[in-house]
Image: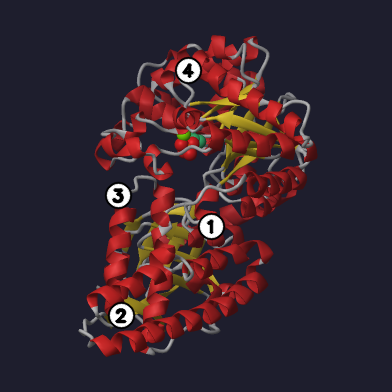
Amino acid sequence: MTTSAPTARLGRADGREPVVLHGIGVAPGIVIARALVFDHQEVPFFRIPLLRQEVKPEVARLEKAAELTKNQLEVVKARTVDALGEDHGYIVDAQILMLDDPLLIGRVEQVIREQRVNAEWAVKVTLEELASVFDRIQDNYFRARRGDIFDVAGRLVRNIAGAPNRSLGKLEKDYILLSENVRPSDTAQLDWEHTAGLAMEVGSRTYHTAIIARSLGIPCVVGVRGLMKKVDHGAPLILDGSEGIIVLNPDRATLREYRAKRRREKVVGQKLEHLRDLPAETTDGFKIVLQANIEYPEECAAAEKNGAQGIGLFRSEWFLTRTRGAFPSEEEQYVVYRRLAERMKPWSVIVRAFDLSAEQLGDSASESEPNPALGLRAVRLLLRHRTLFKEQLRALWRARVHGNIKVMFPMVSGVGEFRDAMSVVEEAKQELRRDGLEFAGELPCGVTLEVPSAAAIADLLAKEAAFFSIGTNDLIQYLLGVDRGNDRVSYLYEPLHPAVLRTLRFVIDSAHEGGIKVGMCGEMAADPLLIALLVGFGLDELSMNAVSIPTVKNLIRRLSASEARAITEEALRLATVKEVSAFLGEELRKLTPAKH
Ligand code: PEP
Ligand code: MG
């Protein structure tokens, strides 16, 4: 096992063949520039057995390195706050806190004492233990936190070994930064001004580095397998953060094509900026509310910048990473919800109640769960842990005094379950009254509509829920029986499957007949190909990653709702995904004729 210090190399690589690499586009935009490889200098771990009398000085060596690491991170934090704003300081805070965590430093010390080994080796042992814990976690979000711990540990080992910490310093030109992993604490050392784009082998949408790139407007592609093997330092490169594509050593024709695309995007972008404060309104006056999905409260800045009309989904599980896996108190939650409510006023903020699996919650029943996606999770789990659920609800009731906070319950499968959840809402209210705390007169409680059984009885649910928000990411996986995270069956994960379209139609119509609003917060809501279809369905709200809002708004403003309804009707008559997709593609081309 090795850890590393960052170094940067530049050079030229001419006359190479173009190579196209695919990843996940997490921040849109096209960049054409040369590659700057952000490499990792390997520091090998070595094992030295200690004599009894050497143990104490070794622990002191560890403590000294931990102290030094903390001081360095304080500096990194100050730079982060300086460059990115106060809200981003917590990223480094979390790492500073890890240095006090018994799971990390405490365990390293224990290994030194028990196994009588050098501190570097004890870090390696501890990391391997932590790695196996993280590898068992299914949730991508929590897996992404693995990077934070390894980041801190790498810095710690360098300090134990006395190796210098290198940084990229100030760059002369604009480059596309390529790395196996730009770790969250590296981000403060980067010269973002000259970082035109970023690509990494690891990462997910919710990795801190991806979030930072997105909020800085730096096109970014993550999860590019084999990137570091194929790249040449200084190689000419195209990065398309919208499509998740990297072209190494592009030829002239490709360069021409992407330059033209970039020009088009720029023009569109400029036009879109001007749309920021305009409503998402069709040519015949039908308005849709466009909201942002956020994983972190700090993403509100991007939501505002892109003209979001509120937050359609706050994945409140974020608290668990903030509080290092421990559950946040009612008070901690209240502060965050209240701030969100105040900031987004008068728009609404929909907080999704903790959407966790039993394993993430540390529930003992989880060990025997063969299929966690169908297991004890989300609202089912909350109903088993009523105190925890109630604390969240109490915090929400209280926060609503300060703005338009709403809550929705994930994975509701039927009316009985929804009523059970509502009984906890009522209990929370009675308790607040008893405790003499200030709380709102009502707390709108909705359903994250994502289980097919709930969709099938949407008419019954609509009589009791305050609103629906369709979680298509899960709805599609359960409806089509396709694991949304499994590469081998991903070709069957089809948002345009006629079964999905019919289900959407029923859910949306049921909501309206029941007199409630219905939104969509799954990834489907941001797909330009589908916007006409979604408008035609009559959805009231679409919630998506903030950067997609301007594009979606632009399309909506070109559509007429009556035409969109006709498009939806026609799409519902078609029998296969291929037919629906070809039809919608044709309709989209009419809306956005290609310009050269
Ligand atoms: C969904 O299921 O569509 C959704 C928005 O939530 P998540 O992706 O967090 O499950
Ligand atoms: Mg879901």
Residue, disc 1: 211
Q: Determine the image quadrant of residue 359.
A: top left
Identify residue for label 4.
454
Mark 3 vs mark 1, CA separation in Å: 24 Å
Disc number lying in front (2 or 3): 2
Residue 465 vertical placement versus 33 (above, below):
above
- Where does residue 142 sit, x and y in percent of width and height? 42, 51
Q: Residues within 10 Å of mark 1 (few under 14, many from 20)?
A: many
Of pointers 4 and 3, the one earlier in the residue sequence: 3
Q: Which residue is mark 3?
A: 136
Q: Secondary structure at mark 2?
A: helix
Residue under label 2, please give it: 120
**Sequence order check: which comes first, mark 2 or mark 1?**
2
Which mark is nearer the camera, 4 or 3? 3
* In front of the other: 31 or 408: 408
In-image side of 592 versus 584 (left or right): right
Task: Name the N-terminal-most of marks 2 and 3.
Answer: 2
Q: Mark 4, mark 1: which one is toward the viewer?
A: 4
Which of 253 and 564 lies nearest the eye of the viewer? 564
Residue 593: image location, x then y, percent: 56, 39
Q: CA distance from mark 4 to mark 1?
A: 33 Å
